[in-house]
Image: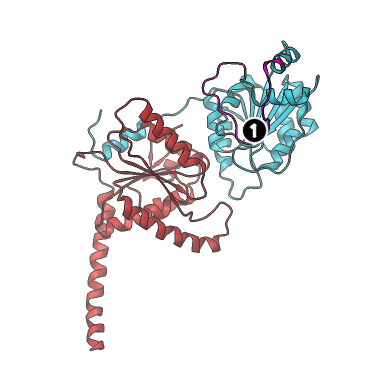
Amino acid sequence: MRRRVLGFQCMFPNLGRASPRRRIPLGTITILQWPTEVNLLRTGEELGSRERRVVFVTVGTTCFDALVKAVDSDEVKEALLHKGYTDLLIQMGRGTYMPSKVSGNSTLQVDYFTFSPSIADYIREASLVISHAGSGSILETLQLGKPLIVVVNEDLMDNHQSELAEELANRKHLFCARPQTLQETVEAMELNNLLPYMPGDAKQVVTLISKFLGFPVD
Amino acid sequence: MGLDALAAACCVLPVLLALLAVRFAYVLWRSGQPSSRSPTAGLRCLIVLGSGGHTAEMMNIVTALQKDRFTPRYYVAALTDNMSLQKAQVYEQSLIQSGEKIIKNAHFMQIYRSREVGQSYITSIATTLLATLHAMWLVIRIRPQVIFCNGPGTCFPLCVCAFVLKVLGLGWSSIFYIESIARVKKLSLSGLLLYKLRIADQFYVQWPQLQQKYPRAYYAGRLM
């Protein structure tokens, strides 16, 4: 009962707070007529004043078992605990490897789900994001101002994704790693060294296109 | 009788081909020229969406467009792509609900994919042909005046068909290609083809390294 309630809390961290744009994630509706206020109050007491520092792992719409396995390994979980993180939430997409859910004290709480229409809320709740090298995930995380480790999928043919990750890593906006090097990246990372990412603007291109089409310039 | 017809064909064919070549050269030249006349009404747009980051980037561009100048908007996504049209629908719905004077005239269509991710290049030839026929059908139906694309494979048959119609004098569409932000050092296959074949009227890249490598491309900063 306690584990399932905690699991529910992990999946619906905003429950109990007013959140008008809250969308229920797809693929996680396994719970039927779930918690009454009583259960939620119990959860609040249990987690108490412990500040949750969530690591959110996302593979987008892909299958990236190597990353999920690496993140679920004891070494990486130890490294994350050592850095002060308390929870690990894995969005595993089309992956076939199922991580093991963990709950209990003095260990990293682990939970996972497959897909969600929008991961923006999860990113906002997280203290660290570990993502595949998809441009959407990378840019969404950087625009929300969260520290990011990008893990490149070496099994992909024509790995153009790594270009963006490497360029942004060179510009010190994120850390880049491979599934095998994830542990040492976590251990060595200094979040203060990251530079904030200034989002771009589509207006310039739109102005040029409008001008080309003969529209009057504003 | 048969020989006469053959002889006639042999005379007419080179003339036709010559005319086509001249027309082709004219279209190439004219496509690169900015329009001298201001459009009187909104331009009919074809917006090509793609899986992964493509749709997010394209919606970012659509958000910045002046809606009264670029309307009606036709969104096209691949048949196997479930999320892209949804995202576009959500956006168009939000425009109507925001109370601006937006007429509900956005259209959402699907097209056969030329090549699925990971599909072998040999079977891709057959699927690309099918996609091209479907693309021609869509372009004839929509008759877009402006096409926006940013790299998914679905955009190539659409742009080629639009260009062919341009050469045949059956409708003029200005094709704008904005290479994805994920392309830092190399162009995508669609981008490379559209650049080399000069099918796009304007070709935008989002990193200065690419602009140096492909001088006919425009660099106007990152879009995201």
Q: For chain B, give the colour.
A: red
Q: Closer to the camera, A50 or B34?
A: A50
Left or right of B70 on screen, residue B209: right
Chain the render paints cyan: A
Image position, residue A94 (x, y; %): 64, 43
Residue B61 image-quadrant placement: top left
Q: What residue lies at 29% left-to-right and 49% top-to-bottom?
A: B173
Residue extent of the magenta highlight: A16-38
- Look at mark 1 in the image and give the residue it sits on: A29
In the rendered image, is residue B221 in sight? Answer: no
Instruction: Classify residue A189 as left or right of residue A24.
Output: right
| Residue A31, percent from left and from top | 68, 30
Q: Amino acid at mark 1?
A: Ile
Foreground pick, B60 / A89 = A89
Q: Position of residue A162 (x, y in %)?
A: 59, 40
Q: Is residue A19 magenta?
A: yes
Residue placed at 59% from the left, 23% from the top?
A: A194
Q: Main secondary structure of the magenta part?
A: loop
- Specify how the rendered protein is coloured: by chain
| B178 displayed left or right of A130 | left
Is B18 placed above or below A184 here? below
B156 w.r.t. A177: above or below: below
Q: Quadrant of residue A24?
A: top right
Task: Please identify the quarter of the rendering in which residue B202 is found.
Answer: top left
At label 1, counting other C-alpha atoms closer than 10 Å, the crowd grade (few under 14, some 14-19, many 20 or more) is few
Quadrant including the N terminus of chain A:
top right
Q: Chain of mark 1?
A: A
